[in-house]
Amino acid sequence: MASTQYESYPPELNAVEEQYLLENVKDWSIAHGLAVRPAPSFVEPSQDPTGVLAITAPVTLFPSLFPRRCFEEGLAIQKAYNELYSAIARDEEWLKEIVEELIDIDDFVGKLWQTHLAVKKEGYVQDLSLGLFRSDYMVHTDPSNTSATVGLKQVEFNTIASSFGGLSSQVSNLHKHLLTIDAYPSSTASVIKADALRQSKSASSLAKGLAVAHKAYGISRTSRPLCVLFVVQDPERNVFDQRHLEYALLEDSGVRSFRLPFQQTLAHTKLDSDRTLVYTPPHSPSTSYEVTTIYFRAGYSPDDYPNAEDWDSRLHLEKSRAIKCPSLLTHLAGCKKVQQVLATPHSPHLKRFLPDEEVASRVLATFAPIYPLDQSQAGKEAQKLAQNLDSASRYVLKPQREGGGNNIYRKAIPPFLEKLPETHWPAYILMEMIEPPPLKNAILRNGDLQRGGVIGELGVYGVCLWKDGGDILENFEAGYLLRTKGDQSEEGGVAAGFGAVDSCCLVES
Amino acid sequence: MASTQYESYPPELNAVEEQYLLENVKDWSIAHGLAVRPAPSFVEPSQDPTGVLAITAPVTLFPSLFPRRCFEEGLAIQKAYNELYSAIARDEEWLKEIVEELIDIDDFVGKLWQTHLAVKKEGYVQDLSLGLFRSDYMVHTDPSNTSATVGLKQVEFNTIASSFGGLSSQVSNLHKHLLTIDAYPSSTASVIKADALRQSKSASSLAKGLAVAHKAYGISRTSRPLCVLFVVQDPERNVFDQRHLEYALLEDSGVRSFRLPFQQTLAHTKLDSDRTLVYTPPHSPSTSYEVTTIYFRAGYSPDDYPNAEDWDSRLHLEKSRAIKCPSLLTHLAGCKKVQQVLATPHSPHLKRFLPDEEVASRVLATFAPIYPLDQSQAGKEAQKLAQNLDSASRYVLKPQREGGGNNIYRKAIPPFLEKLPETHWPAYILMEMIEPPPLKNAILRNGDLQRGGVIGELGVYGVCLWKDGGDILENFEAGYLLRTKGDQSEEGGVAAGFGAVDSCCLVES
C-alpha cells in the first residue's frame, strides 16, 4: 500500500466527531462485555472491595490498516503452524535436545521438563493433547522504504494461555458497529468499508476447540458429570476475555466448565486410582465432576509458582487422565529456543516436522532470522552482533518466557549482556527486529485518549487436537487478534498496560 | 401458594455458595451489559471524568417467587390494556374533562395540555401514535391471610418512557444462566427450574415496536435517510437499558437511531415547511435525517423543563410529522387521575373504552380501588378516609407524576394533607394499598448484598400503534419486568436507588 494511505489515516476528528465516536465506544463496549476490571491505579481496591466495577478494555477507536495479502496469508498458514507445533510436541527426542540446552540456565524450563519426566515415569494415561495456539506476527517492511511491505514476520508462537480470543471477537464487532452507525467520518469511506473489516470468530472457535476435546475424552468412567476446568490466576483483571469462552462453550456446545484458581488445585481436585481427575466444586461439595479437559490460563509464568506446592499442583494435573490444553511437551514447544532453532537461517529442522515442501516454504517465509547465543558457529556470530551497539540496534533479545515485559531491545542489549554471566547467554535468543509500517491510531485506556504512532501485532488463533504417537484429529484456524501499542512502547501486552485490542481494516498492499 | 414456600425461599447460603453465586452474577452481568454507570456517591465524577466505568445494575441474586396464575393473567390482558389506553388517547373530549380538573392545580399537566392545544391550533400532521407501555402490578393478598393470593392489582400504567425493558431481558437470562450452572443450591431444585423461569423478550419486543412505527411512517418526503430519535436525559446513568433497545432496533430491523439530549432539541432539529422533522447529527452535519419516530426517554418529569425553552422544544417536536412515542394525549392518558377515574368503584368509564364485557371485566379485576380527593361524593368520602390516621394506613396518596419519589404512604397522609391547601387536594388520588405476599430475596447493589423482606412489582410491556380517529394497526404484549425492592422502602424506582431488577420464578398459587 502507498505510504500516504498510512500517513493520512486515521483522519483528524473535530471535538464533536470525537465525542460521538467515544460515546459509542464507551457504551457499546460495556453493553457487550468488551471490558476489564479496572486497574488498582484507577480504582483502589478499598473503594470497590467486592469488585463490581468494570471499564472499557483498552481499545483502538479505529480499526488499524493491515495489508490484505499479509492478513490472508497469516490465516491461511495457521493450520500448517498447528501441524508444526503438534509435531514438535509429539517428538520428545527432538524436544529433549533443545530443552537440555536450557535446563541449567532456565529454572522454569527445567522444572517443566522435570515435571514431564516425573509423569512419564509413572506413564502418561491420556494420549490426546489440545492446543489453543496463537501465532503472533508483525508486518515487515523494507527498512530502507517502510512503504514497501515485505510480508508477515512471526514475533512468537504461543502454545499456552493464548489470551484475548474472547475480547477480539467483540472489538471487531465494535468497529463494524461504528462503521454501521457512521461514527467514522465520511472521508474514511473508501478505506473503512464492510468488505475491508474482518470479523474475528475467535471466541466461538476457541470454545469449539475446547468442546471438541471434551467430546473426544469420551464418557465418564465414574458416572460423574463431565466438565472442562479453566485453571486461572486469581485475581484476574482480564476475566471477561475468559468468561466469553466459558459462555460460548456452554451456549454453543452445552459443555459445563469451572474456573479453578491454580493455587487451589490441590484443595479441590483429586486423582482417582486410575488417575481420573475429579473436581469437587467448593460451593457444591455433594457433586463431583470428572474433568475432561484442563485449560491452562495460569501456570505459564514462573510468577505462578511462588511455592514448591505449586509445582506439586502442576504435576498433579499433568498426571491426570484429563486432556491438557496444553500438555507439558506442548508448553515446552513454545520456548523461544524452539522458535530460534526453526528460524536460524539454513536450519534443517523445519522439514522434519513439515515434510510438504510447499507448506514448509510458506511457514519459513514468516520467520524473522533468529540466532542462538550459544557456542555454536551461529551463536558465536550472534554474540558479536549483540555486543556491538550499531549492529545490536537491529535486534531484540528474548528469554524463553511467554508474555511481555522480559525483552531487551536494540541498544540496550550490549550493556545488558555485559552484566550477564556468559554462561547464561544461551538462555536468550537474538531476533532481528521486524520493521513495521508507520501506523497511527487512537487508543482509549482508562478514559484517556492517546493518539499517535502505533505498531500492530496480528495474532492468529489455531485449534489442534492430536494423539500423542498418533495423528491429528482436528485442526482449524480460529480467528484472529490485532493488538496495537504505541510505537514508543516496545512491549505489547494489552492487559499489562502497554497496548489495546484492535481489528483489521484490510488494504491492498 | 403455601406461605411456607415463601418463608423458606430463598435458602440461606453458606459463604462458599454465596461467593460462587456472586462471582457469577458480577461477571455475567458485565459480560452481557446488565449494567449502569456508577452513582456519584460510589465513584466521584472527578475520578472518572470521561465516564468509562460501569457497574452491575442492582439485581436480585435469586428470581423472586411469583404466582403463575397472576403472571399469566398480567401478560394475557396486556393487549386489552393497550387497547384501553389507545382508546383513551383517541378520545380527546373525554380526556379534556379529566385534564381540565387538573390544570389549575398541576402546572405540568396544564403545560402538556396547552402544548396539545397549540399543536391542534395549527393542525396535527401525523395521525399515527405509538405506545410503548408498561402496566405495573403487585400481587394482592388477603390482608388477614397473606398466604391467600387474591390476584394482580395495578399500581400504575406508564404511557411514557417505560424503562428497564433493555435490562429486564438480561436479568431473566442471568437467572437462567445461574440455574444452568447450578449456582443455586440443590435444595431449590423443586422451585427454581427451567419451566418456572420466565424469560422476558422485552428488549427485542420494544425495539420491534419502534421498528413497526418506523416502517409505518412511510418513505421520506425529502429523500433523506430515515431515523428514529431517542430523546434522552443527559447524563443518563441507566444508558445501557436504552442502548440495548437501540442495538436491537439496528440488528433486528436495520433501523438507524440517534440519541438526542432533550435540552439540545432546538439546536439539532428543524421543521421543514411541511413539518417534516429533520435531525442533523452534530458529528456529521453534512447528512440530515428525516425522523420517523420520536421515542421520549425524557420529558416525562417537570425536572426536564427547567427553562421556558424546554417547553418550546416539546412543542417543536410535537408539531412535527414524526410519530410520537407517546403523543401528548397518550402522555396525558397516563395521569393518575385517569387511572383513578377508571378504578373508582362503580365507575361507568371502562365500558366506554372496552366494549367487550369479558375483556373489560378482566381488566377491572386488576384495579385496586382508587378515589379522587375532589368535591364529588366519592371525593368527599375519600377525604375523610385520608384525614384519619387509622383509615389512612390502608392507603397511598399519589400525585399525577410518573416515576417514583412522590408518593405519600399510610400514616404520613393526614399530616401531609394538613399542610396542603385544600384547593390542591384534587391533584392527588387516594389508592388502597396493595398487600403483597411476604417475600425474601438478596439484592446486589454497589457491591453490597442486602438480604431480607422484599416486595415485587410486575411490569408488563405493551406495544400499540394506532391511527388517531382510526383503528389500531399493531397491538402486542412485549415482555415483562420484575422490579424488587426492600419491604422497608415504599418506593420502587431501581435507578433512583430503591430497588433491583429481577425475574419471575413461577409457583402454583
Image: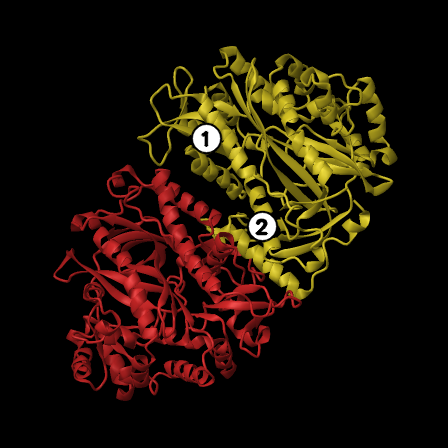
Chain colours: A yellow, B red
Which residue is the site of mark 2?
A174
Q: Quadrant of residue B191?
A: top left
Q: Earlier in the sequence, mark 2 or mark 1?
A: 2
Q: Chain of mark 2?
A: A
Inspect this view and state whether residue B445 appears: no
Depth check, front residue: A262 or A296: A296
As drawn, B169 above or below A427: below
* Amino acid type, residue under disc 2 in the picture: Leu
* Amino acid type, residue under disc 1 in the picture: Leu
Q: Which mark is residue B323?
A: none
* Whole-percent x, y for residue A336 in the image: 69, 27
Depth check, front residue: A320 or A6: A6
Depth check, front residue: A105 or A329: A329
Which residue is the site of mark 1?
A229
As drawn, B497 above or below A504: below
Of all residues shown, which one is farthest toward the left? B144
Report the side of B496 relative to A473 (left or right). Answer: left
